[in-house]
Amino acid sequence: MELSAVFRKYAGEGDGQLALKFSGVPHLCNVAIEGGEAVFVKLGLLSPEDSLAAIRGKKLLEASFIKGVKTRKRLPRPVTDELLQGDATAQDSVGAVAQHDDKGGQTSAGSRPG
């Protein structure tokens, strides 16, 4: 199963949450998709930067998509390229996380310590 093909398939279906199971990784990796882009990535308790690093080079075993799920957290910019290409610079380029309330308003923003 190829991550780029799976992502393209579900990103074309609309906004939602993509749950990915990778070999050798005990937790599901959740990817928030909005407008065809990955706007947030989370693996267990890891930060988005560490989540991207943890799945880099791992084999994708399973994927499921929940259409219509709204994300409460967004990164300052999409991380689609880092997710699909396994870019070595992903850890330094993800940045701060913005958290949003149920009505879409921003409630807080901050940088994760490096």
Image (spheres, grey):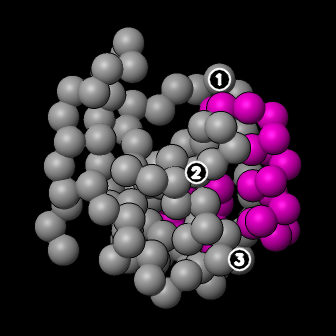
Does 42 appear above or below 56? Answer: above
In what element is the residue under mark 2?
A: strand
Q: Earlier in the sequence, mark 1 or mark 3?
A: 3
Looking at the picture, how far across and down is residue 32, in whole percent? Answer: 55, 43
Looking at the picture, how far across and down is residue 63, in whole percent? Answer: 74, 52
Observer-side mark, 3 or 2, equals: 2
Looking at the picture, how far across and down is residue 9, in whole percent? Answer: 84, 49
Closer to the camera in the image, 80 or 19: 80
Left or right: 55 in relation to 96: right
Looking at the picture, how far across and down is residue 58, in whole percent? Answer: 63, 79
Quickly name the residue at label 3. Answer: 59
Does 41 appear above or below 55? Answer: above
In what element is the residue under mark 1?
A: loop
What is the distance, in whole Å, between disc 2 and disc 1 at their CAs?
14 Å
Which contiguous range is marked in magenta?
1-30
Kind of residue sitting beneath label 3? Lys
Quickly name the residue at label 2. Answer: 38
Q: Earlier in the sequence, mark 2 or mark 1?
A: 2
Residue 34 tag number: none
